[in-house]
Structures are given as C-alpha cells and as structure tokens.
Image (cartoon, helix red, strand yellow):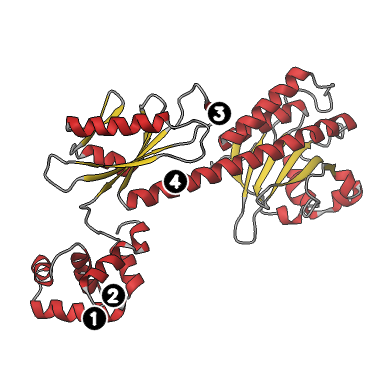
Amino acid sequence: MTRPSVEPSATSKPMHPAGATTEISLDRFSRILDKIYEAALDSSHWSDCLEEIRRELAGNFASLIVQPGTADDIGLIVSTSEQSRNLGLGNPLIMFSPFTGMPPDRLVTITDVLSEAKWRESSYYRDWCQPRNVFHVMAADIGTSNGGVYGFRITRPEDAPAFSKQDLELGRRLLPHIKRALNLHLSTHQDRKVISLYSHAMAQLMVGVFILDQNRQVIECNPAATAILAMSDGLRIVGGNLEATYPNENRSLQRLVRDALAHPKASKISLTDALSISRPSGQLSWGLVVQSIASDQWTEGKQRPTVAVFVRDTEGKAQPPIRLTQQLFQLTPAETALAIQLANGLSLDEASDALNIRRNTARAHLRSIFSKTGVRRQTELVRLFLNSVAWLGTHD
C-alpha cells in the first residue's frame, strides 16, 4: 500500500442521517461483499469498500488500521468519510485507545469497553476523537492467518444515535468476510512476492523462462528471456510462438513442445526434454529444456500456463556482483577482479593482460585467492564461483 498525504476531513457528514439505517436488502449486502472481495485482490480498493460500509451504517468515518504505529512509526490507517477516501498516516495517540488489546474478531461498541463518563474523561477522546467529531464507535480487531491484527472502526458524531443492535448484527455479518478478504490479500501478495523473487534469481543466473499456453503461444517471459530474444541469436518469437532460427532445430523444438502439450493432463509428473539451439553468431549453443506444466481444472478452456521453456547461455561469463563476491570470499578488489577473470576460463597470463597488471602481481594475487578460498586449482575456483550465492545479488 502507498501512503497518500490527505487525511479524512474532520467535519465530513454521512450520506444520510446517522441512525436512519433500515434492515439491509440482499442487493445492498451483496454490493458491500463485492467491494470487500475487490479489496482482497487490490488493496487500493479498501477505501471504496470502507466507504460502502460507512454509508450503510450511517457513520462519519470508517477506518481500517493497517499498522497501528509505535513510538518510532506513526503507522498507517485507511480512513474514509463523505469528503475523503484516502490512505492516511496513522494516529499518533492510538496506543491510548480503549480498544487497544481487544480479543480478536469480536465486534464491540464504546459502551462495551467503558462507561460514557470515563469515555468523556479519557485523554484519547478529548485529544483525538472530540476534535474530529467522533463519539460513538463500533470496533473490532481482526486477526489474520499470518498472526497480524487489523483494526476495523466505524464512528458517528455525538448528535447521532448510538449504534443499534441491528447495526451491530450487520457489522458481525460483515466481519468474517473482511477477515477472509484480508487473508486472501495477504496470501496473493505473498505469492506475488515469492514469484518475483524466483524470477529475479533466475534472471541473475541468466536462465530465460518462457511460459506457453495450450496453443503454444508465449504468455509470459522473465527479464532474462527478454534479453535472450533481444540478441536475435538463435531464438525468436514468430506469431506468438517461440521458434529456433534454423529449420531442423525449430522442428525439434516444436516437437518437444507438442510432446509436452500431449502429456496426460491429469498427471502430476511433468514431462521434461532438452535440446541444444545453435546461435548464428557462432557463440556456443543455447541449452534449452522444455517441461510440461500440470493442468489446473479451474482454468480449463482458458488461456493457461501449459509448457515452460528454460534457456541457458552455456557460454555465459560469470559476473557475480563484485561487492558480494568480496564479502563472501574476503578478497580485495584486485583479487576479486582476477578471480572473476580466472573463473571465466582465462589463463593467468590472459587474465593479467585483460586487467593490465604484471604477471608477478597476478601470481601474488592468485596465491592470496587460493589461501582465502581454500582451493588449489583454477578448475576448483571456477566451480566455487559458479556455485556461489553471489550470483543471486543485485549487480553493482
């Protein structure tokens, strides 16, 4: 979620007189549910969802406390009113709220927590609520599957009726749906984060990934795959299909894709085949693997991921981030530069020429590299670097 700067207006009024709620119709309840589950898919829709609930309950504010805030962090609250539907910075006084520490998933009003006299006497009411024309409060803390807690609040001004049993019943019916929506959002957001992380790792390792649908159309490719296509060196996309430049290799590639497509849909075991793709530039061939993807019956008949094609540059030069390489192996900058040249297959003389350093200096660096990494041969150094996690870091 982003943090727009506008706070809800303290003088905003509900769409219709507070307390004028009638028994909710099925259409209106369905409309609120639509908004709740739209918010599950896109967090920017939470303000629309809260606004719909605020209108129905005739409140002057509806809020979702995303981050309650601490002494070091003011937190984040999605808060809507008649005049404003924005994310705002949190409430710096929220730690003094009488609703702090409530049992999760229980909807209450202010009168369930303390008497009206104590509410009026509280510093939280005087310093935060009263200036914003907030008196009646309906509140719940919603516990999510990851152990988090979100605060749900609907408020009314003092001159409006208190929340009725009917209002509370509607709130209690909505609460499980809000909880599910929050859990759905957390789950999908986490999945996207993990997928993004995997994609980043594959790109850093220069593994191109092409995802094909049931019609052999490329529906997605990662940054490394895009870079491979940009080279125009053995692989291309024609009419939405991934093709090899040379006809005989293209026939082999298309056969592997067809075989993957023909793999039994119900099978949980993927079919995997490999192929070498020549490059017109004369560089070493691309290494290519075609793998079937188990079908999902929920996407039957629709565009769905069906085949994955992985492409690797067999001649790729090792270029792990220099800073991470230094940290991993405790090398100096000069030693790191030499080690990377050696890991890419250069001899010590070739590496010293490439780096424009003396042979004796290169030999001294090499002795130090061997001592620090614990290897004794250049072949071991190559293996050490290619297996290093330094590849997975962002390049310097």
Residue type for callout 4: Ser
Query: Residue 47 appears at what percent x and percent y?
Result: 62, 34
In this rendering, the label closer to the viewer, 1 or 3: 3
Residue 107 as seen in the image, left or right of residue 115: left
Q: Secondary structure at mark 4?
A: helix
Residue type for callout 2: Leu
Q: Residue at x 64, y 55 (%)?
A: 69
**Mark 2 sits on what residue?**
331
| Residue nearest the viewer, comparing 293 with 55 | 293
| Labels 2 and 4 touching (C-beta < 8 A) | no
How far apart, in angstroms, are the residues tagged by discs 3 and 4? Answer: 25 Å
Q: Earlier in the sequence, mark 2 or mark 4?
A: 4
Q: Residue at x 80, y 32 (%)?
A: 173
Residue type for callout 1: Ser
| Labels 3 and 4 touching (C-beta < 8 A) | no
Q: Counting other residues with Cα less than 10 Å from the Cα at mark 4, is it few (<14), some (14-19), or many (20 or more)? A: few
How far apart, in angstroms, are the residues tagged by discs 4 and 1? Answer: 38 Å
**Mark 4 sits on what residue?**
196
**Mark 3 sits on what residue?**
297
Q: Residue at x 29, y 60 (%)?
A: 320
| Residue nearest the viewer, comparing 10 with 337 | 337
How far apart, in angstroms, are the residues tagged by discs 1 and 2? Answer: 8 Å
Q: Which mark is residue 271?
A: none
Q: Secondary structure at mark 2?
A: loop
Query: Residue 5 appears at what percent x and percent y?
Result: 54, 42
**Mark 1 sits on what residue?**
368
Residue type for callout 3: Gln
Residue 331 as seen in the image, left or right of residue 110: left
